[in-house]
């Protein structure tokens, strides 16, 4: 795999993240965009995997693995939390369904376990964005300066947004975190503008061209003595044979 292939993978990553950013904005209008965003996030992770087959970079590997682990942990935690909430509702509204002490203990255990899984997932996702930021900082020469800076800032925004999303139950931090995530995704999406081919360097012929030489204004000097006709060397003002002055 060449550097051009790696750049294509990062360009594809940027395109997919741009779709994720748009879907995240549209989440306000419809929930189905969450599923679309999720699909394109994993497609983007596939682009990172392909690029890392050539780069073999530990930060890229950690970004992908921690993000996937964080996602799985948050999904499991959400399911467990919802299950615990359902058991709590059953405890209060249908107390005869299970013995009260079993239903209440189960509900509390499930809800606490679900919250722990979610927090572990959030921590893993925070570390994943940190690893991606480290990659762009350490490999900034692979990208144009403006795109590299945007990617670094985008990772920082996504990291902050993920932290704030953990406090979404406080509403305001959740809203701010949501805005930070949108900004972060759009900044990472600037990788879509990554140029694939480098500007060509000067050709060998251009590099080997001789420097221009000043024109000798004395090339038109007289070749023969006007008195005796002997050929002149052009080094003096007098003829070497007869001594006549050369004008």
Image (cartoon, helix red, strand yellow):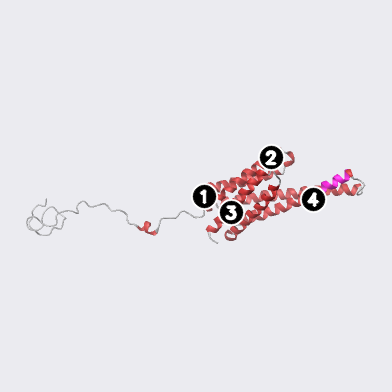
Q: Mark 3 points at which residue?
A: 12
User: What x and y, as percent, mark residue 183?
Assistant: 62, 43
- Sequence-first disc among 4 and 1: 4
Closest to the camera, between mark 2 and mark 1, is 2
The reply to whether residue 55 is in sight is yes
The quarter of the displayed image where residue 166 is located: top right
Q: Do the residues labelled 2 and 3 touch (CB within 8 Å)?
A: no
Q: Is mark 3 on a helix, strand or loop?
A: helix
- Sequence-first disc among 3 and 1: 3
**CA–CA distance between discs 2 and 1?**
32 Å
Q: Mark 4 points at which residue?
A: 80
Closest to the camera, between mark 4 and mark 3, is 3
The crowd level at tag 4 (other Cα within 10 Å; few <14, some 14-19, many 20+) is many
Residue at figure coordinates x 53%, y 53% from the top left? 142
Which stretch is magenta? 79-92
Q: Are marks 4 and 2 in contact (CB under 8 Å)?
A: no
Residue at figure coordinates x 37%, y 59% from the top left? 205
- Sequence-first disc among 2 and 1: 1
**CA–CA distance between discs 4 and 1?**
45 Å
Which mark is drawn over residue 175? 2
- Sequence-first disc among 4 and 2: 4
- Sequence-first disc among 2 and 3: 3
**CA–CA distance between discs 4 and 3?**
35 Å
User: What x and y, as percent, mark residue 165?
Assistant: 70, 43
């Amino acid at each position: 795999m060449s550097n051009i292939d790696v750049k294509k993978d990062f360009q594809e990553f940027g395109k997919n993240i741009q779709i994720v950013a748009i879907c995240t904005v549209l989440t306000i209008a419809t929930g189905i965009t969450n599923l679309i965003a999720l699909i394109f996030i994993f497609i983007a992770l596939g682009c990172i995997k392909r690029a890392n087959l050539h780069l073999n970079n530990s930060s890229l590997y950690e970004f992908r693995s921690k993000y996937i682990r964080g996602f799985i942990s948050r999904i499991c935690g959400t399911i467990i939390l919802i299950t615990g909430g359902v058991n709590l509702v059953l405890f209060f509204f249908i107390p005869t369904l299970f013995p009260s002490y079993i239903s209440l203990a189960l509900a509390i255990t499930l809800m606490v376990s679900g919250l722990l899984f979610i927090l572990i997932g959030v921590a893993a996702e925070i570390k994943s964005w940190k690893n991606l930021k480290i990659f762009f900082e350490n490999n900034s020469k692979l990208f144009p300066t403006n795109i590299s800076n945007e990617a670094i800032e985008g990772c920082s925004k996504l990291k902050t947004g993920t932290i704030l999303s953990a406090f979404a139950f406080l509403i305001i931090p959740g809203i701010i975190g949501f805005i930070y995530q949108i900004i972060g995704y759009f900044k990472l999406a600037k990788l879509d503008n990554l140029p694939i081919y480098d500007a060509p360097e000067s050709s060998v012929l251009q590099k080997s061209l001789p420097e221009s030489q000043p024109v000798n204004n004395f090339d038109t000097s007289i070749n023969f003595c006007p008195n005796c006709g002997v050929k002149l060397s052009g080094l003096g003002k007098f003829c070497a044979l007869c001594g006549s002055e050369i004008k």
